[in-house]
Image: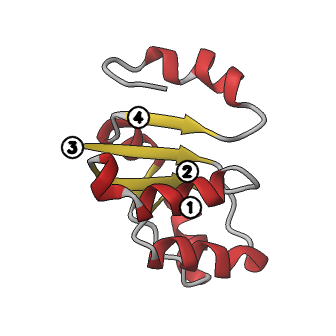
Amino acid sequence: MKNVLVVGTGTIGEPLIGLLTALKKDLEIDDVYFYKRTPLVEEVPKVNSLRKKGAKLAVTDLVAADKFNVLGNCPNCLFEEALDQCDVIIDCTPAGNQNKKEIYSNLEGKTF
């Protein structure tokens, strides 16, 4: 079994997170994490929906965690912790290739 981290909750990330959580058993996934950088009032329903499906919210830092908490989106962990806990990282952001060079390529034993 493995843990998967999806970075980004936009056009690609949101449905992918939903699909991965729905197929956890078939894909032999323990947990699906998703990273959300910015707490936005208008995205509270989306974050709540993903969490109700079983995905775990990872946020940038403790300051962001406090802001998410105020909105009722309680984070499960920080981004760095999710990177440590996850075996597979899927970046669905426009900066994905840059993130691969700057962040993910330095991680050992990960698939991205």
Dot label at residue 88: 4
Q: Position of residue 21 (x, y in %)?
A: 42, 61
Which of discs 3 and 4 lies nearer the camera? The answer is: 3
The type of residue carrying mark 4 is Val
- Secondary structure of the residue carrying numbered label 3: loop
Instruction: Identify which residue is drawn at 26% across, 47% down.
Output: 28
Q: Quadrant of residue 83?
A: top left
Could you give the CA–CA distance between mark 2 and mark 4, rounded to whole angstroms? 18 Å
Secondary structure under the numbered disc 4 in the rendered image: strand
Which is more N-terminal, label 4 or label 2? 2
Task: Name the amino acid type tagged 3.
Answer: Met
Q: Identity of the amino acid at label 1?
A: Val
The residue to which callout 3 is attached is: 1
Mark 4 surroundings: few (<14), some (14-19) or many (≥20) residues within 10 A:
some
Say the numbered circle drawn on residue 60: 2
Q: Which mark is residue 63?
A: 1
CB contact under 8 Å: marks 4 and 1: no
Q: Nearer the viewer, mark 4 or mark 1?
A: 4
